[in-house]
Image: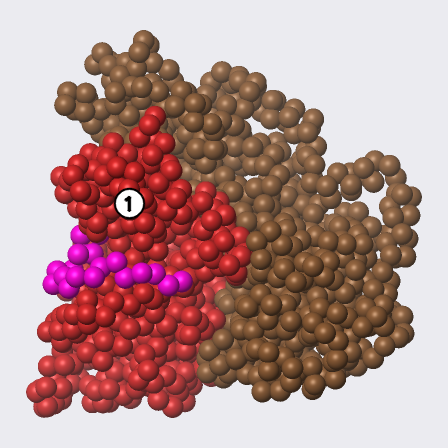
Chain colours: A brown, B red
Amino acid sequence: MTFQAKTPRVDPSRMANAIRALAMDAVEKAKSGHPGLPMGAADIATVLFTQFLKFDARAPKWADRDRFVLSAGHGSMLLYALLYLTGNETMTIEEIKSFRQLGSKTPGHPENFVTPGIEMTTGPLGQGISTAVGMALAERHLAAEFGGDLVDHFTYVLASDGDLMEGVSQEAIALAGHLKLNRMIVLFDDNGISIDGAISLSDSVDQVKRFEAAGWAACRIDGHDHDAIADAIARAQKSDRPTLIACKTTIAFGAPTKAGSSKSHGSPLGADEIAGTRKALNWDAPPFEIPADILDAWRAAGSRGAALRSAWEKKLAAVDATQRAEFERRMKGDLPVKALTDAVANMKAALAEAPKDIATRTASEQALEALVPVVPEMVGGSADLTGSNNTRTKAMVAISANNYGGRYVNYGIREHGMAAAMNGMALHGGIIPYSGTFLVFSDYLRPSLRLAALMGERVIHVLTHDSIGLGEDGPTHQPVEHLAALRAIPNLNVFRPCDTVETLECWQLALEAKDRPSVLALTRQNLPQLRRSNDAANRSAAGAYEISPAQGEAKVSIFASGSEVSLAVEAQTQLVARGIPTRVVSVPCMDLFLEAPEATRSALIGNAPVKVGVEAAIRQGWDAIIGADGIFVGMSGFGASAPYKELYNHFGITAEAITAAAEARLKR
Amino acid sequence: MTFQAKTPRVDPSRMANAIRALAMDAVEKAKSGHPGLPMGAADIATVLFTQFLKFDARAPKWADRDRFVLSAGHGSMLLYALLYLTGNETMTIEEIKSFRQLGSKTPGHPENFVTPGIEMTTGPLGQGISTAVGMALAERHLAAEFGGDLVDHFTYVLASDGDLMEGVSQEAIALAGHLKLNRMIVLFDDNGISIDGAISLSDSVDQVKRFEAAGWAACRIDGHDHDAIADAIARAQKSDRPTLIACKTTIAFGAPTKAGSSKSHGSPLGADEIAGTRKALNWDAPPFEIPADILDAWRAAGSRGAALRSAWEKKLAAVDATQRAEFERRMKGDLPVKALTDAVANMKAALAEAPKDIATRTASEQALEALVPVVPEMVGGSADLTGSNNTRTKAMVAISANNYGGRYVNYGIREHGMAAAMNGMALHGGIIPYSGTFLVFSDYLRPSLRLAALMGERVIHVLTHDSIGLGEDGPTHQPVEHLAALRAIPNLNVFRPCDTVETLECWQLALEAKDRPSVLALTRQNLPQLRRSNDAANRSAAGAYEISPAQGEAKVSIFASGSEVSLAVEAQTQLVARGIPTRVVSVPCMDLFLEAPEATRSALIGNAPVKVGVEAAIRQGWDAIIGADGIFVGMSGFGASAPYKELYNHFGITAEAITAAAEARLKR
């Protein structure tokens, strides 16, 4: 727990000034960026990184390192300076000089997929602090599973006013407080300044009181007083609750005229101000040069975790081989391939034998009953819709402050905080988080889902009640634009399976997509099982496939997803009865299909003179398959409140409507 | 301020039981719905509606009525029962019996566009309480403008645990506390139950302390004690701060076995439980029948505001005619057509005379300088990006707790709360709210924007930094999927103007779209003014138009929006130089264009053999114009951090790339 510092060999204030100099000089050279935060928070970072943070700069992927999340991602130069100073191998001074340039390791905001040593991509405010909750939860969960010898670290966050003003921060702190995640320590850079000016223009919240109300320990300190910072962190480490340390700081500390002003937030200081800052801080070194004694001291701080890491590796080596292999597998993110494949095959065989006409949310529940036991890294949850999302298997025990070893999180009515926490678990490693809410509420969690896609994190969102098929709850609860809006996010797979078999296949694909989040859009209403043969191959993997071929050359091709595939098959029967050869293509994942080579796509789309797309949602996106002149049977606006079968009739999404439209087009 | 009740002629508990009976019977008949909340909150509602709420059930649109927002929209039967009992003319007992049926006035969640007397559409949790902040702010603002004789009312909210768990609630209460909106009173139905079970499964927040931390008055009471409820509301009315009244209630109060249990939250109680409830509540009346004395008492409560309304109408009649006409115009939502039209015409003339090659965000600022003075109902703001969104005109004064008469809101870093508050201002009437953030952060406010679209409210979101053109801030800040994702929302206009003139035209269209929200997607980078003639007509109104025709029959049609229109025009020059007749169509609003009749669309799309779409965003949606085989020059994934011109080159969004692709296709 305690990780004492070596006695610093230089004045720690000068070490902090090294951060300030690098930050202001890099921003100046880039002609854009945010010098204010790194300069204001330099003292906090210096104390944390030299006295507390358990890390080895040369081994940024060490599993049991403390996590440090710069929630205020605009202050990225703070992180880059720290990485350079502590001796991260990627972060050369040349990279610092290339701040915000194409191809550099120093983009405008920290990007974990670009720069080793950065825990997560931040910038959109509120995400860092909320994601860190998931990291802190992952730590407690894995400690419960693998023991404190292997998993025993803190999660630190540096957060700004903006992070705390964002609503998602409330969801996060409420969850962390409820779960008593006492390994989470938030250092609040309380500088009283935002882009528009003083925080007092827009905010009067007593943050200490607010965090206390959420079950946190909280205190206020002078964020430039190294002893006060150290005392507060030491106390936080011993707390039985997560801790907020509100550090009163001066933004752009040291700048003669712009310190304490919003002018230093997001613009270069300018040559004169920088000269004045050098003078005020007694900093003589030229830009991008760090005096040797200071760099030495920083490098010592960066390597002081090496011995701890060696000791930890010895502990790992001493662990029972099976347990060690399992720990390593999980931290690498590799799946238990054999067990998973067998479970899928067994369930497929069972479904072929005894088909089930059930809602895909129920099919998902049954898939989970098969998968969760054999993929122990799966940690489920729901934003208070467990019984509707069907995300909890019978054996799953809830995670609570008294039992971190459970595998189910009651996230509460906090979709956004849930998605952020899921990102944190995935980033921590060792866990594949999945969770649920209604598809329409994907809007609430979108910023976190986008970050998951950008970072390439494997999180799986079970989004049920995926159309007007949910019925009486009406248009506030009926997604119509959400499938399109989610498909629009790059590097996200949106699955919408049509039956029990596709649901299972989509689950398998989601688990196997190591570098990509997935959405499973599932129905409330029952659907017939269309796939009745026992296919060894995962047919959904192509994104789209012919689920019901034509007899002879097709005159009509119907493309559909999810609950509308069975309507398409019904229409096929009607059309065939009228002498019109028709084929049906199921599109369980349009994203995967559109990624296929053009020849593959063209071959499946085919040359039938009439192409019909069917989805109980808006048309946007479907033109890529059916063409701008294709027929689309779906929604063109918001839904309505009524029993679902009436709604399908009311909005004209029926086999009869498909048949009539196709027939009319053929006669045109 | 005080609005004393007549002495109730019947036991108020029996009046509350009338709500309970209607709620449980309607849910039972519908076979779906939420009986728990109406039954639990019936006492709160009874006290509020019989003793405090200033309303006249026969005149639900009376401008100075108190607003009542059922934030917990799933408890819709509470509202429907109240509307019926108090004598709302639309809400017959037949409508109550048609709960959740197609075409009824009683949909699953309250829909203000369906049912007169309902202030807003609720259901997505957190929206009601957050929207109410805008209503309360509108009240103070209009009182400052038109005087307390005309505008003097409260905004009441009934909120559930779920509302308070949603992050947007924090943004809302922080804003309300900061602005000291003391006319806002939140009745928290503190029943300790959510869908998954006891709130203690997922939450430990001390809500009273949390609201106090946000600058609210707050107290705890027994939510079934009518005197306590009345006392608390009376005190809240006198507070100098907004007030939270945490009312401890029993969900499904009266139900013998399901009261206090999550089983009563979202399912019918069942015949036996209903029989038991009737017994426990001493309620003998058959389903949907209300004993005459109770109905009389309720009807008296519903009409007790009639006299006040008459008095208010006399006050209005006594107001100076100009002022009265202005008040009535604003509350009707009519624009000052002549002044607006003149301002647009004048600015167009000036731009034709002296074209400006500026960023569209700057063009928007200049449009605002022309429009804000002549459209006094415009109230601007930004989520702490004022200098980047260019949303504040020079003369605009900030709204603060000391000056509600200002016209600019410093929303803080609270995009979601901002959008919800804007909805509230629009719903209140008298205000056209506009505000700003970065386009990428539209993800944060999406749930509120969707509600605005569903309700048909005129709110205008200025979303700047609309592509990789923002440069160095990198992929966390660069929208690529957001234009598509926003266009996907029904009944929302997404404008992306290409120059100063289109920006002005789009502003005009946004203001004129009375029943629809609008987004203005604007650049950070400078753009040439392409429209140099003084067009009297608003060419953007069609959504798309030929901005640069071909000489002769076009072989290439280029369709582009925003910053890419000038690239299209450059490519046109290059192609023409190669002997290839080319036309350019500007698409400032794809939504409007796609709403046009097919003939209009086909005519503009034309028959050029090569069609190219250009937008620094993903392709989704463009196939509707260029076809599935059209050429698209844009983004296929996330952006990167670098100066913007380098990014355009890096991602191949250049005139040269357009030219090369079109030429290659022609040769194919």
The chain under label 1 reads: B
Q: Residue at x 37, y 15 (%)?
A: A549
**Residue A185: where, in percent of width, then height?**
70, 68
Q: Residue at x 83, y 64 (%)?
A: A299
Left or right, B188 with respect to A329, comes to: left
State yes or no: residue B89 in magenta: no
Q: Residue at x 68, y 35 (%)?
A: A335
State yes or no: residue B533 in magenta: yes
Q: Residue at x 22, y 29 (%)?
A: A657
Under mark 1, the amino acid is Gln
Classify the position of the C terminus of chain B by image quarter: top left
Residue A380 to residue B139: above or below? above
Residue A553 visible from this viewpoint = yes
Q: Label 1: which residue?
A: B572
Residue A637 visible from this viewpoint = no
Read off the magenta span: B525-543
**Residue A658: where, in percent of width, then height?**
25, 27
* Most foreground residue, B422 or B117: B422
Magenta stretch, main secondary structure class: loop
* Most foreground residue, B534 or A141: B534
Residue A68 to residue B183: above or below? above
